[in-house]
Amino acid sequence: MPAPPDPPPWLQVRRFACGEHAPVSLCWRGDELIDWVCGGDRWVDGVFVSARRGWGYGRFDGAVADPTGRWAVVHERTGTAALLLHDGEIVRELHRSPYHADDFLFPVCLFAGADGRVLLAHCPDHYGRIDLDDAATGERLTRGDGRRTIDFFHSQLAASPSGTGLLSAGWVWHPWDAVVWFDVAACLRDPARLDALDGAPHSRNVCLAEESSAAWLDDRHVVVGGSAEPEDPDEVAEVARDHPGPRLHPLGLAVYDVVAGRCVRDVALGYAPGAMMPVGPRHVVTFDDHPRLVDLDAGRVVHAWPHLRSGASVSSIVGNRTEPPPALALDPARHRFAIYVGNGGGDGGHGGGSGDGDGDGDGDAIEVITIDVTALP
C-alpha cells in the first residue's frame, strides 16, 4: 500500500478511540469534548472519562452549549423536551410547542450577553416567537405587551461571536426555508423586535433561491447557504434587471452585511452547503454529506474530507430523514471541529494516515480537525 500523503501545513488532524461507547452529542468545553446527552461523558486529551449517569429520559439526542461549555441544553432534536444544565447539573426543564415539533429541529442556543449574563434563546410558548431568558435566574427578558406570534418556524438559532446578533434558520409554510436575524440589544430594549422578519432583500421569495442554512462570519456578516430548489427564470431576469449585484443562488453561498442590509458576496458551489462553520474572515467549512473548506474570496472548495460522513444538514426540516447525523462539535473561535467517525473510518482527514495515531483504526473514533488560518494559501 502506498504511503499516505502528508497533510497540508495548515491542517492538524487528531483521532482517538471513543472508549466505552460512541457519542450521541459532542460539545466543546475548553479542550475537552463533552457528550451531554450521555450524562456528561467526556474526552480529556483523547482519554474517555465516564460520567456514570444519565437523565432518566431516553429520547434526548441533541445538545448545544455556550462558548464556555459550562452551560448546555440537552434536547430532543425533533420533540418538545429539553433540560438546561450548568456544570452538568440540571437547572430546569425546557419545552417548546408540539406543533410540527416532530418535523424540524429544536430551536435553542446559549450565548453571553453584553452585560456578561448567559442568555438562553428559545421558543417556549409558540413556534413563531423567540424569547430570551437569563439562563441563571430563569427571568424572561423579552416579555412585553407588544409581543405577537408570527407564522415563522424558528430553528437553528445561532448568536454572533460577541453575542450582539441572533439568527434563525427556520422555515415558513410552503414549506420554504428562510433566514432572519436580530439585533440582541434592540430586542432587549423592545422585545417586539423579535417578532419582525428582518433578513436578506429577497428572503422568502419562493421564486428565488431557498435559504436553507446560515452562520455568523463575524458580528456584522452572515453567510447563507442555498438549497437545490430551482429558481423561476422570469423572476431571475426581473431581479437581474431591477436589482443587479450579488445575491444567493441555488447550490451556493452568499454573505450579507446585516447592518447595511445588502449582499456583499456570492459563491457558486455546485452543492448545497448545509450546516456551516466560519474559519477566519474568508473561509467557511460546509458540512452537508462531508466537510469541505470553502475560500469565500476565491469562490471555490480548497479542501475536502470525503471520508468524514457528516450526514444531511440542509434545512431545519428533518422529519423525513431516517438517520441522524453523527455527533459534531464546532469551535469557530479556535477554527476546529470534532466529529464522530464510526469504526475509526477514514484516512486521517488528508487522504491517508491517521493523524496523531491515537485511534486504533478498528473501533469507533472521534476525529478533531484544526485549521491554522494564518497558513492557509
Image (cartoon, rainbow, N blue to C red):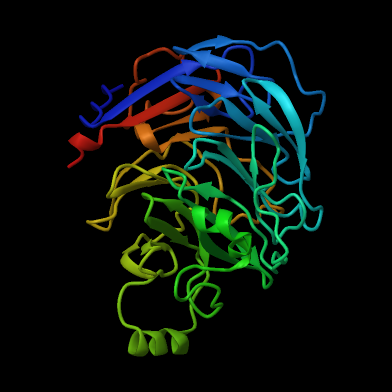
- Residue 362: x %, y % from top left: 51, 16
Q: Is residue 344 visible?
A: no
Residue drawn at the location 64% of the way across and 36% of the way down: 135
Work out whether residue 193 or residue 249 is closer to the camera in this orientation and state it: 193
Left or right: 355 with respect to 23? left
Work out whether residue 305 or residue 372 is closer to the camera in this orientation and state it: 372
Left or right: 369 with respect to 185? left
Work out whether residue 8 or residue 34 is closer to the camera in this orientation and state it: 34
Residue drawn at the location 80% of the way across and 58% of the way down: 99
Residue drawn at the location 28% of the way across and 55% of the way down: 296
Residue drawn at the location 60% of the way across and 61% of the way down: 194
- Residue 325: x %, y % from top left: 59, 40
- Residue 235: x %, y % from top left: 46, 86
30 vs 193: above or below: above
Left or right: 350 with respect to 233? left
Tally of numbered tags: 0
Q: Can residue 285 be seen in this view?
A: yes
104 vs 4: above or below: below
- Residue 63: x %, y % from top left: 63, 34
297 vs 350: above or below: below
Image quarter hosting the C terminus: top left
241 vs 209: above or below: below
Image quarter hosting the N terminus: top left
